[in-house]
Amino acid sequence: MRMGIPAILGLVAISVAAPAMIGQSARRVLVQRSGTSYLGIGALEVTAERAKTLNLKEDRGVEVAHVEEDSPAAKAGIKEGDVVLEYNGEKVDGVDQFIRLVRETPPGRQVKMAVWRNGMTENLTLTVGARRGTVIETPDGSVTIPPIPPLPPIDIPRFEMSYQSPLIGIEGESLAPQGQLADFFGVKDGVLVKSVIRNSPAEKAGLKAGDVIVKVDDSKVTTTREITSVLRSNRTKNSFTLTLVRNKKEMPVTVTLPDRNGRANPLAPTPSPA
């Protein structure tokens, strides 16, 4: 039977009891992951009816329905049809308990098991193994899930957000979250000028792409929004001093803004009427 990987990986200690199996041993599907202690046995519950058929004195233990090749159980001589009655001195009552006992035993440790075979009790010694890879264990056998190859490293492109400061005419990007890039420009933070709009106040003031604006007048700025906020908070002013870092050196630049109607600086001298 072929199963999809998502369906297989979703099976964790699932009990299955089909109508045709009522009165027989309940069957279980168990996921054993890499490193899990295991014996390599597909086990079934022993019902009262099955115990009578096997001539058991009590209806307890687990019946071996399958022995995995080259497993610890196979190497110790466990056979299909055996009934495990004791595990390391502890009576085995059912499959869930048996699974727990095996899982709690460290790999590499020797254990003794009492099994019922052909109407007699036999004592066997096994060395608990460690699973390699993920295995779906059923009473009818085991299915090994091939390992999923590691994904190759993916170079995820980095998307930076840049914003315009329309009042002075630049497109800028905050350097605050980009430590290495800020170090490259010789600053701790600030606004990197990515482009300057033609004929804007910034171009007229001499700003260039690659400049880093760190202050507007005496206010420290780290985003284009902060630049705009400082400019708008001083509506009566038209000239501002920007502190730039260019070639890792600070320099002041005076930017003159147009008035609200887009005209040239109203503070500039105008001819008096004659």
Image (spheres, rainbow, N blue to C red):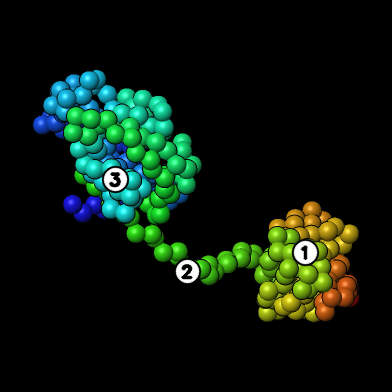
What is the x, y in percent for residue 40? 32, 46
List x then y, in percent, for residue 205: 80, 77
Query: Where is the C terminus found, in terms of image quarters?
Result: bottom right
Q: Are marks 2 and 1 in contact (CB under 8 Å)?
A: no
Instruction: Please report the residue visible at 18 percent of the width from the left and 33 percent of the height from the top.
Output: 118
Crowd around label 3: few <14 · some 14–19 · many ≥20 (10 Å): few
Using the numbered discs, state the Cα–Cα distance from disc 3 to disc 1 in whole angstroms.
Answer: 75 Å
Q: Position of residue 196 (x, y in %)?
A: 69, 76
Q: Is mark 2 on a helix, strand or loop?
A: loop
Front residue (pair 68, 236) = 68
Give the amino acid at mark 2.
Pro
> Which residue sits at x=79%, y=57%?
230
Q: Residue 190, labelled with which disc?
A: 1
Residue flagged by tag 3: what amino acid is it?
Answer: Gly
Q: Please identify the residue farthest to the left as the structure is shown.
A: 20
Q: Based on the displayed image, in which of its 4 quarters is residue 246 positioned?
A: bottom right
Asked whether residue 185 appears in the rendered view, the answer is yes
| Percent coordinates x, y for residue 43 in the rendering | 27, 37
